[in-house]
Structures are given as C-alpha cells and as structure tokens.
Image (cartoon, grey):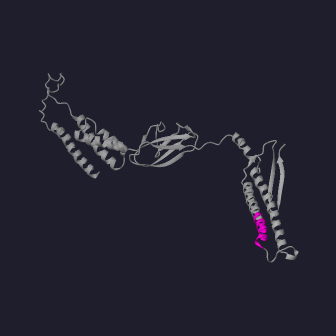
Amino acid sequence: MRRCACSGALLAAAITIAVTVPARAQSATPVAPATPPSSNDAAEPSAAPPNATPPAAPAVDARAKCVTEHEQAQISRMHDALVSARASALSCSQAECPSLLRTDCAEWFAELDRQVPSVVISVRAGSIDVANATVNVDGKPLAQALNGEPVELDPGHHTFEVTPPGRPKLSREVVLASGEKARQLVFELPTEAAPEKSAATSAPASLVTYRPVPIVTWVLAGATVAAAGTGAVFGSLALAKRSDLEQKPASGGCAPYCTNAQVAPVHHLSLTADVFFGVAAASAVGAAVSYWLRPEKPISAGSLRLDFGLAPGSATLGVRGNL
C-alpha cells in the first residue's frame, strides 16, 4: 500500500506539472503594448483579436480535481474508509481524467466495490415486520434503513440503535469484516403482555388431578399374593415332611439313616416353595414400580375412581370422585 501511495504521488506530481505548464506558457505569451484610443475610436466598442484563444481554466481545474481524487482514494483506503475511497476512485476514473489516472482508479474501484461490507437491517415484532422504526448507526440517523436494501458501511466496529414508535430503544454492537456482504441484522421487539383472557385460559391448569392405579399394578399385586400364598403352602408341606423324617424309626421316621428316596420329596417341596416365593418377590417389585410411576389425570365432573394405597404395614382402598 505504501508503494502504491508513493507511486501515485509521483504520478500525480508529474501530471500536475504537465497541467500547469500550458497555463504558464499562455501567461508568458508577449502582448502588444496598448495604444491610447483616438477620439474616433472612443465611440466604437473594442473588438477582440481575430486569432484570440479561449481560456483553458476549466480543463485545468478538471485535471487538478482528478489528481486530488487519485490521492484521496489512496489515503482513504489506508485508513479503512472504503466507502469514501471507492467514491474517490469512481471520480478519478471518468473520461476527463488522464489515462494513467483512469487506469489506476478503475482498478481500485473494482477492488473496493468487492471489499465494502454491507448489512440488511430488519425490525420484527413476532412475525410482523416493523418498518417505521428510527435507525441510527454510530450516532447518526440512517434514512431508508428498513427498506430491505443492503446498507454499505466501512469495515470495523459499529453501533446500531433502533427506536420503534412507543417502544424502548434497542442497541447492538457489530463488527463488520471486509468483503462481508448483506449481513442480516434482525432486531426482535419484546412481545407485549398478553390480554387478561390469557389468565383465564390458564385457570384449567389448576384443576384437581389424580393418579389412577393402572391395571398392571392390580395384576402384579394379585400375582404377588397368589404366589406368596402358594409358596407358603409348599413350604409348610416341606417342613411337615421333614419333621416326619426326623422321627426315630420306631415313631415312623428314618433319622438318622434316611435314604435319598425318602429325602427327595422334602427337597422337591422346598424347591417349589422357593420358586413361588421368587415369583411373589418379582411381582411385588413390578407392582411397586408401576404404582409409583402412574400418570396424572384430571378429575372430570361426574367421574368416580378407585384409589389404592400402599404403606409400610398397611394398605388402603377407597372410592373418590364427583357426582
């Protein structure tokens, strides 16, 4: 960039000298001494020389402006003022500028046009777009900012402030990168308080609910009772049979010399009792889990429900509802 600025300055100086030399040459052209007008010529208007050359000041001013814009484009670009630099590059790329300047400026303009970032600002209240809000960027008002068109800014840090009518101001800090195009900046307005009817609609949430005992809990609870009872019966038979075998042979027993055939019925009865006790334990766990995880349901008018409760050492059974 410094090399570009130096070469541009030398080029501008050369063009400035070329522009000012013709003007000085014109001012150095000898002019014939004026003769006092005679009495006959006093009444006649003075006529311009037949070969007089028109002044070249407008052309000199246009070329001087091209040189100035050429320099300003480089200075603005070095300071990251890309929008201003692009405007200067466009000005010095016009047809009235020297060809050397036009070549540089046209190339710079194309590069700067790709580098200038832009944003698209929108303000929304829910699903509704708000188009009458006031938008300020870095403390300066930005007209036509909410028309959906990209707004071009210099790269770097910017502060966006949006003030909708009758609403508090919204502010956002944004850092734009060079070449970032059409970045979406959406300002969401906080939703207003819902009307009073919303409180009435939320009233049903406070309805009385209950947790009905599911059928599976009843089935598992019944299985628990049945299995426990059956296991107790087989366990009692096993104990009675064992008691008989432990008697002396004179009393109908075989102790202490019982054979495997005599002991096998006791083992079978004990094993059967253990199996039923295991089924009872598993059913009891399943009934407890299904009972504690039962869902809640609202109590509707005219409904009755059967309530069953378990507690350490007790159980409750009742009917509840509205008639």
Residue 55 vs 13, above or below: the answer is: above
Q: Is residue 283 magenta?
A: no
Q: Which residues are magenta?
A: 259-272
**The C terminus, quarter of image:** top right
Residue nearest the viewer, comparing 106 with 144: 106
Residue 221 lies, in percent from the top left, at 78, 56
Residue 273 vs 91, above or below: the answer is: below
Which of the 4 image quarters holds residue 24?
Answer: top left
Residue 253 lies, in percent from the top left, at 84, 74
Which residue is drawn at the image coordinates 53% and 40% (left, top)? 123
Q: Is residue 214 visible?
A: no
Provide the major secondary structure of the magenta segment: helix
Image position of 199 (left or right of 237): left
Which residue is drawn at the image coordinates 14% and 28% (left, top)? 51
Q: Is residue 266 magenta?
A: yes
Which residue is drawn at the image coordinates 28% and 43% (left, top)? 70
Residue nearest the viewer, comparing 85 with 45: 85
